[in-house]
Structure formats: C-alpha cells, structure tokens
Amino acid sequence: MEKTPTPFEKRHRDGSLWARGQTLDDLPTGYWEWFRIDGTRLRSGHFQAGRQVGEWTTYDKTGAVYKVTRMKEG
C-alpha cells in the first residue's frame, strides 16, 4: 500500500507562514516554499526523500526571481 504525504506548515513567531510543503516518513518530499515575515516568497523547490532535487529558485524582496540553482544529483 502506497503512503500518502502529510501536509506541513511552519510559522514565524508572529504567526505568519514561514514554510509550506509535505513530508513522507518525516522527510520533506515534493514541492516546498519558504516565505519572509512580510509574506513574500523567499525560496522554492522540490525534495525527494529528504534531498533537494532539480531547480531551486531564490526570490528577491519584491518576489521576483533572483537566481535559480540546479541541485547536483547523487
């Protein structure tokens, strides 16, 4: 039987959203994103069995793409 990922959220001290994604066997999996206290997106990317995979995007303070990093495989 295939397991289903569990939604995950973490919040800043002020209650605003800090991170959102999902876990499988307590490891991050699938698409995740992190936010600044003001709500703008800081970073986003994918996990596979707890490891960063593929392209990860970092955003500037306005929410525009600042850089894209390709994670090394293996």
Image (cartoon, rainbow, N blue to C red):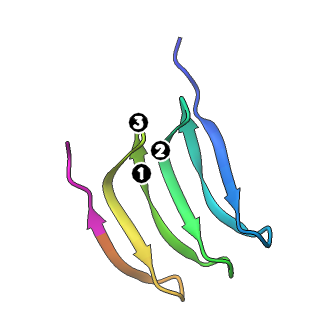
Q: Is residue 23 above or below residue 2?
A: below
Q: Is residue 35 left or right of residue 15?
A: left
Q: Which residue is mark 1?
A: 46
Task: State the image quarter where residue 57 is shown.
Answer: bottom left
Region in magenta: 69-74
The image quadrant where one finds the C terminus is top left
Q: Position of residue 32 (x, y in %)?
A: 51, 54
Q: Residues within 10 Å of mark 3 (few under 14, many from 20)?
A: some
- Amino acid carrying label 2: it is Gly
What's under tag 1, amino acid-wise?
A: His
Query: Which is more foreground, mark 3 or mark 1?
Result: 3
Measured Cα–Cα span from mark 3 to mark 2: 9 Å
The secondary structure that most of the magenta stretch takes on is loop
What residue is drawn where x is 67% and y is 76%? 39
Give how far apart the Cα atoms at labels 2 and 1 are: 5 Å
Q: Residues within 10 Å of mark 2 (few under 14, many from 20)?
A: some
Mark 3 or mark 2: which is in front? 3
Picture quadrant where residue 36 is located: bottom right
Q: Which residue is mark 3?
A: 49
The reply, left or right, for residue 62 in relation to residue 8 is left
Give x and y (percent) for residue 40. 61, 78
What residue did someone put label 2 on?
A: 30
Marks counted in the figure total: 3
Please report whichever mark, 2 or 1, sits nearer to the chain's N-terminal start.
2
